């Protein structure tokens, strides 16, 4: 019998319609059956049929922080976690199940099994840097919307392919550059855009002191695959012997695993904020010149971007960042004044009049907070609108950060074509736009 010829009794109905009809018929029959209002979406509750389901790929310290914020949303349901380490999978399940008061969260060693689930709407990708682009691309191709921790790709080519895939698959994407959704950074950018600083001429973005490390830690016995899947942990990165320090988080700084000589650790945020302040989300600097203290970049509109190297633990800062403002500080300078802000939420202006105007016009929230940023992501999943840090925004700010890193690596001035997205007359620099990917799927 064709679908069109189904009898009325067998015609498919929605879950909401079924539950409402069941509740009504039960009441009419006088049976002592109670259906909670939350099931039907009343009393301010979200009906189960209207919840967005979330899967997690890679759950370490940063992901745990993100996920705790996402679990607060009543219309979001985390249903699955994938991680190559058993200890992290188990800790994630404890977090989620404790929050919901059940034992429903499913665990996977191989994230491809999670992506095979048709009931998952979106994924949070919070692996190490080497996996962000590849996992996000596979998720998009599996029909999932993606929130990816930053840096979203460890090469220019990764970021280009990621953005292209999100467009081709028509997926909603949010880069984990959450400071675009944090009030003090938003206010600082607003001051630039509304002309309160006069004509913008210089911006400062802080980053870690760059470093390159191609060494290998000593090889150790390989653990059982279910405890740590070393092949999947490495993923697209070049093979090297197992060492437990890597999987415990000591992979940062190593070229095979990190992004742009560590410049993107902060630069993915701070350069992104400068891109936004300069209203340059559709372009990027065209010139990059490194020195011992910073990388000086220039836009076609004449604005200068200075990417400053800040030493850890950030007690001594050049050029004289205000320490109390916290990590990831940025400074915007115009012809009539300047503002500086960082993760502690305070904005410091160059003049009393401007400081008075800022006053308490924004809510103080720490720069690490992802609540508003993730809410924006989930709202855009429903509306299919553009997120605050969508794939195009990510592409340009990440490419700018990578271009700066390549200039530092080569220790020479580079020129970049924002349209062709390639360096001008520099073969070495163009070769560094991509890296060979290991065939991890065959392992």
Image (spheres, helix red, strand yellow):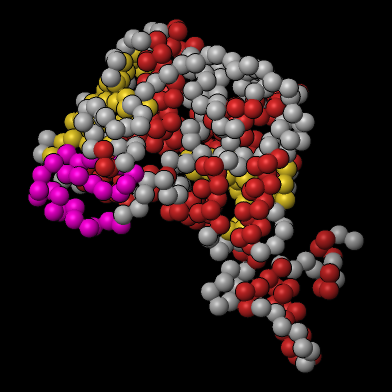
Residue 112 visible to an observer of this rendering: no
Q: Residue at x 44, y 35 (%)?
A: 394
Q: Which of 315/398 is in front?
A: 315
Picture coordinates of residue 183, whole percent (x, y): 32, 51
Q: Residue at x 12, y 35 (%)?
A: 335
Picture coordinates of residue 339, whole percent (x, y): 20, 41
Quadrant where the C terminus is found in the figure: top right
Say if the magenta span includes residue 342.
Answer: yes
Read off the magenta span.
Answer: 338-363
| Horizontal arrangement in the rendering, residue 406 relative to residue 21 (left or right) | left
Residue that protrudes farthest toward the right in the picture: 1
| Horizontal arrangement in the rendering, residue 160 relative to residue 26 (left or right) | left
Picture coordinates of residue 78, whole percent (x, y): 63, 54
Snapshot quadrant of residue 361? bottom left
Snapshot quadrant of residue 169? top right
Residue 54 visible to an observer of this rendering: yes
Quadrant where the N terminus is found in the figure: bottom right
Give the answer, above or below, for where 144 lies relative to 383.
Answer: above
Q: Residue at x 71, y 68 (%)?
A: 15
Give the answer, above or below, for where 419 lies relative to 141.
Answer: above
């Amino acid at each position: 019998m064709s679908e069109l010829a189904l009898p009325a009794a067998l015609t498919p109905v929605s879950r909401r319609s079924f539950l409402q009809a069941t509740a009504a018929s039960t009441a009419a029959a006088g049976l002592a059956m109670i259906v909670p209002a939350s099931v039907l979406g009343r009393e301010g509750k979200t009906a189960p049929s209207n919840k967005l389901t979330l899967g997690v790929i890679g759950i370490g310290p940063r992901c745990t922080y993100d996920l705790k914020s996402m679990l607060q949303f009543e219309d979001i349901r985390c249903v699955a976690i994938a991680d190559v380490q058993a200890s992290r999978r188990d800790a994630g399940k404890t977090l989620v199940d404790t929050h919901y008061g059940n034992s429903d969260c499913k665990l996977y060693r191989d994230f491809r099994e999670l992506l095979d689930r048709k009931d998952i709407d979106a994924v949070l990708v919070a692996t190490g840097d080497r996996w962000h682009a590849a996992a996000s691309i596979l998720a998009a191709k599996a029909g999932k919307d993606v929130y990816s921790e930053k840096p979203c790709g460890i090469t220019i080519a990764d970021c280009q392919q990621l953005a292209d895939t999100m467009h081709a698959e028509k997926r909603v994407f949010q880069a984990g550059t959450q400071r675009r959704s944090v009030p003090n950074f938003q206010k600082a950018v607003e001051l630039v855009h509304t002309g309160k600083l006069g004509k913008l001429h210089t911006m400062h973005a802080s980053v870690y002191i760059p470093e390159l490390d191609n060494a290998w830690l000593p090889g150790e016995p390989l653990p059982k695959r279910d405890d740590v899947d070393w092949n999947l942990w490495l993923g697209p990165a070049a093979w090297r012997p197992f060492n437990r320090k890597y999987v415990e988080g000591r992979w940062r700084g190593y070229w095979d695993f990190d992004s742009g000589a560590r410049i993107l650790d902060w630069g993915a945020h701070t350069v992104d904020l400068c891109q936004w302040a300069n209203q340059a989300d559709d372009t990027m600097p065209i010139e990059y010149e490194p020195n011992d203290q910073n990388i000086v970049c220039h836009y076609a509109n004449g604005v200068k971007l200075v990417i400053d190297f800040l030493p850890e633990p950030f007690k001594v800062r050049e050029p004289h960042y205000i320490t109390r403002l916290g990590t990831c500080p940025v400074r915007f300078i115009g012809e009539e004044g300047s503002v500086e802000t960082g993760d502690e939420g305070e904005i410091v202006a160059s003049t009393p009049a401007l400081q008075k105007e800022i006053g308490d016009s924004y809510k103080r929230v720490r720069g690490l907070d992802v609540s508003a940023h993730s809410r924006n992501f989930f709202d855009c999943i429903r509306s299919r609108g553009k997120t605050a840090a969508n794939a195009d925004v990510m592409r340009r700010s990440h490419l700018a950060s990578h271009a700066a890193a390549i200039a530092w690596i080569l220790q020479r001035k580079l020129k970049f074509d924002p349209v062709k997205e390639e360096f001008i007359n520099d073969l070495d620099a163009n070769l560094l736009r991509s890296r060979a990917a290991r065939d991890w799927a065959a392992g």
